[in-house]
Amino acid sequence: MKDLDPEALASSAEYRRFACKDDPIRFALLYLPDSVRDPDTGEISFSPVHEEWAELAKQWNRPGPKKPAENRHIIVAPRNLGKSTWWYLVFPIWWAAYGYSKFTVAFANADTQAQSHLRTFRKELDENERLREDFPELCAPKRRVRGMSDGDSAGARFCGSGFVFIAKGIDSSNLGMKVGNLRPDCIVIDDVEPDAANYSAYMKAQRLTTIQNATLLLNRRADVVWTGTVTMHGSCVHDAVRHAKGETSTDLDWVQEERFQVHHHKPFIEDPTTGAESSVWPDNPLFDLDEMNAIRHTSSFKLNFENDPLGAAGLLWQPGDIRYADFPCDVGTYISVDPIVSKGNLKSDLTGVAVVGIASATDQDPMRALVKLAVGVRMTGKDLKLYLEGVMKSFPEATCLLVETNQGGDLFKEVFEDLRIRTVTYKASENKEVRAGRLLQLYQYRPNPLVYHLDRFHQAETEMFTYPNMGDDITDAIGGAVLRSLKPEKRRVARMDMRYPT
């Protein structure tokens, strides 16, 4: 602001409009200062991340025709860094004021949340005196021929300038959204994943399907920004974080296939030369460096600030509990199944399937188990039988099919009776938590674990790291074979504060 004429800023709308045309941060200072002001201290300050976002937002004004999926971003940042303020309010008003967007549609987790954002947007257009003075057509609702307002509804604002802003819950029907001949040229997706207690792997898959097959298809050429904070291991935003870290897995392919650029902002900025850490927002008390260092070890900080759900993992498994190896399994190999009883459970439950090999004891190690496959499938009956036939072909060394029948009884004997493998059904006498605790002790056994995984089975690891919040079916299938074979000593249920057994 130092390079601007203060008298011209105070007296000339034309000068103010010109000064902010290419600078959204300057626009925020001149037109939306209360939105970027700290409500507790009354101070205005900016993080280097806000400056980075401003540079991204300028891409909405790039010259020439827009290509399909050329400008898509996922913004992952700590809570309280202002994602919604900037991407749901400041940038959309700036785009609208200068015509960088003619039709913006913004999505939140639910309609009520989206409409709350829209009310804030509408309030600025209706009550912000400087904005109304300098951009009168934008701020005035669109009028019908008879003079009645066409610009206000629960989920939309139609502006006199022709700009359209619609806010909806992500699960609202939105296929083919058009206003006249206009399709959305800007799509904002903000915090559309609920907290872990109200989320699941199945719901995540549904949410991602909605975004890919409905939201993004509103206009393939639209500019897209998706903002969020990781809410649980295996969520969509967590997929983006893993992708940004360079992990490769088929469950992450959607990030690249949809051409998203991921921007993962952390609470600490590290000097590349000295390695010294500074706060991502040093002038904001919520990001005080000493305070963050004091709580950075906590699960809540790791999840909400560092976007690391493993730091706030489940009640049992923690990072480091799963080790990877490959070794001969001379004792035998089991296919273990924890099946769904009826198709009515398909929406919430999985059939857990694990292939587990057992290695005999050596002078250095006791008997060990190798998990060769661990997946969850939404199948039962004949479909499950056909799937297991495929597993048998992939693992011909398997000689026994273990099927837990706590629910379903003799039903599974009929389903699997003509499979060309010895089938053993059993009923688990212990509750799931006790079995999971005994299984975890084998993963944590020292000096060396007694259970290894052949590969990173992300579906299984997501369940184990969040156990039991996201299910237990795959874990039960693994345990069905491992606990039967290794027959460990029964001990107390493992808890968050348990130590490795000696």
Image (tube, helix red, strand yellow):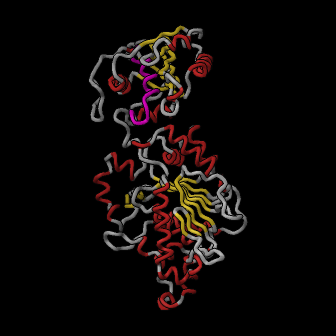
Instruction: Using the image, determine if residue 460 lies above or below residue 152.
Output: above
| Place of residue 298 in the rendered image (x, y in percent of width and height, measured from the top left) | 31, 47
**Span colored in magenta:** 467-485
Say which of 421 and 264 sits in front.
421
Q: Residue at x 39, y 60 (%)?
A: 80
Question: Is residue 469 one of those drawn in magenta?
Answer: yes
Is residue 499 visible in the rendered image? The answer is yes
Q: Is residue 249 magenta?
A: no
Residue 288 image position (x, y, % from top left):
32, 62
Quarter of the image that includes the C terminus: top left
- Residue 227 in sight from this viewpoint: no
Q: Residue at x 48, y 41 (%)?
A: 234
Q: Position of residue 219 (x, y in %)?
A: 67, 56
Q: Residue at x 57, y 56 (%)?
A: 73
Left or right of 32: which side holds 389? right
Number of numbered discs: 0
Q: What x and y, as percent, mark residue 63?
A: 69, 69
Please identify the residue farthest to the front as the structure is shown: 146
Residue 437 lies in quadrant: top left
Instruction: Describe residue 346's horizontal placement relative to residue 407 as left or right.
Output: right
In the rendered image, the vertical position of residue 14 relative to residue 41, given as above or below: below
Q: Which residue is found at the position 58% from the left and 46% from the top?
A: 210
Q: In the rendered view, tell whether residue 206 sits above or below residue 401.
A: below
